[in-house]
Image (cartoon, grey):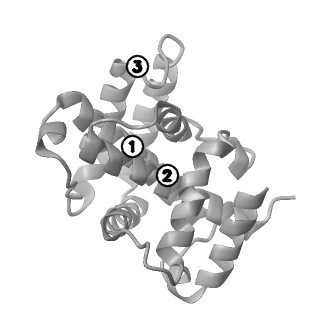
């Protein structure tokens, strides 16, 4: 039987994993292909039986669990940029939750991607372009845009822009799941220790 806290922590780690890839792409113009693939795959798993069904690549999630320890712990490893991206995604998720039209459009567009995957891999440029356009068309206009910082030479490349938007959509998917599993912003302040313990436990398994 799944543990609600562990499931919430898994979804939170999923969001941070995707945002870490956004940061890496923006700074370096490259990222880990397997982790990108794992993050993007979560978008297409819309009717899971369990949280583990969404995050099938447990190795990719390890970066997210480590980021939980850094971001919520008492050490000096907090990444302000990742925090800013996360705050932006959580704010957009709240807007999405209150917008039935946007949710309907999102479901329809993700169905199109699921059909596309009959012919292409999740990291094919056509699929990434489609995921990026979903973020631009459905999510981005719901609230203040998330300002991505990094190397201008990287950020000007169209494929990098599309990958970043696709990964922001993946972070949004995890934020939606986190909220559905009972995640709340105040828990990140008042329940830090239990979330950290859950992340540590997941890393040690």
Secondary-structure class at tag 3: loop
Which residue is under mark 2? 17
- Looking at the image, residue 143 lies above or below residue 76: above
Q: Position of residue 73 (x, y in %)?
A: 54, 79
Q: Is residue 52 above or below residue 98?
A: above
Q: Residue furthest top?
A: 119
Neighbourhood count class around disc 3 (C-alpha, 10 Å): few under 14, some 14–19, many 20 upward: few
| Residue 79 horizontal/vertical position (percent) | 37, 68
Disc 3/disc 1 C-alpha distance (Å)? 14 Å
Residue drawn 51% across the image and 77% down it:
72
Location of residue 47 (image quadrant): top right
Tag shown at residue 167 = 1
Going by the picture, which residue comes out furthest to the front? 76
Classify 10 Å Cα crowding around label 2: few (below 14), some (14-19), many (20 and above): many
Looking at the rendered image, the quarter that the N terminus falls into is bottom right
166 left or right, relative to 197: left
Q: Is residue 134 in view from this perspective?
A: no
Q: Nearer the viewer, residue 128 or 95?
A: 128
Give left or right: position of 73 versus 131: right
Distance from disc 2 to disc 3, alpha carbons, whole Å, reads 20 Å
Query: Which residue is the site of mark 3?
Result: 124
Q: Nearer the viewer, residue 91 or 23?
A: 23
- Classify residue 129 as left or right of residue 145: right
Q: Which of the pair 135/30 is nearer the observer?
A: 30
Q: Residues within 10 Å of mark 1 (few under 14, many from 20)?
A: many
């Amino acid at each position: 039987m799944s543990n609600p806290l562990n499931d919430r922590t898994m979804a939170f780690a999923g969001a941070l994993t995707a945002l870490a890839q956004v940061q890496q792409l923006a700074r370096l113009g490259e990222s880990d292909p397997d982790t990108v693939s794992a993050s993007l795959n979560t978008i297409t798993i819309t009717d899971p039986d369990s949280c583990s069904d969404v995050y099938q690549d447990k190795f990719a999630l390890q970066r997210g669990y480590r980021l939980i320890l850094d971001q919520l712990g008492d050490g000096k490893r907090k990444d302000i940029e990742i925090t800013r991206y996360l705050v932006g995604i959580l704010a957009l998720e709240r807007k999405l939750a209150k917008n039935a039209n946007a949710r309907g459009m999102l479901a329809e567009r993700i169905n199109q991607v699921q059909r596309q995957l009959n012919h292409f891999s999740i990291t094919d440029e056509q699929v990434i372009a489609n995921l990026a356009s979903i973020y631009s068309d459905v999510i981005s206009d719901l609230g203040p845009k998330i300002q991505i910082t990094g190397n201008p030479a990287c950020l000007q490349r169209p494929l990098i822009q599309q990958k970043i938007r696709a990964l922001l959509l993946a972070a949004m998917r995890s934020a939606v799941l986190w909220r559905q599993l009972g995640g709340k912003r105040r828990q990140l302040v008042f329940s830090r220790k239990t979330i950290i313990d859950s992340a540590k436990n997941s890393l040690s398994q």
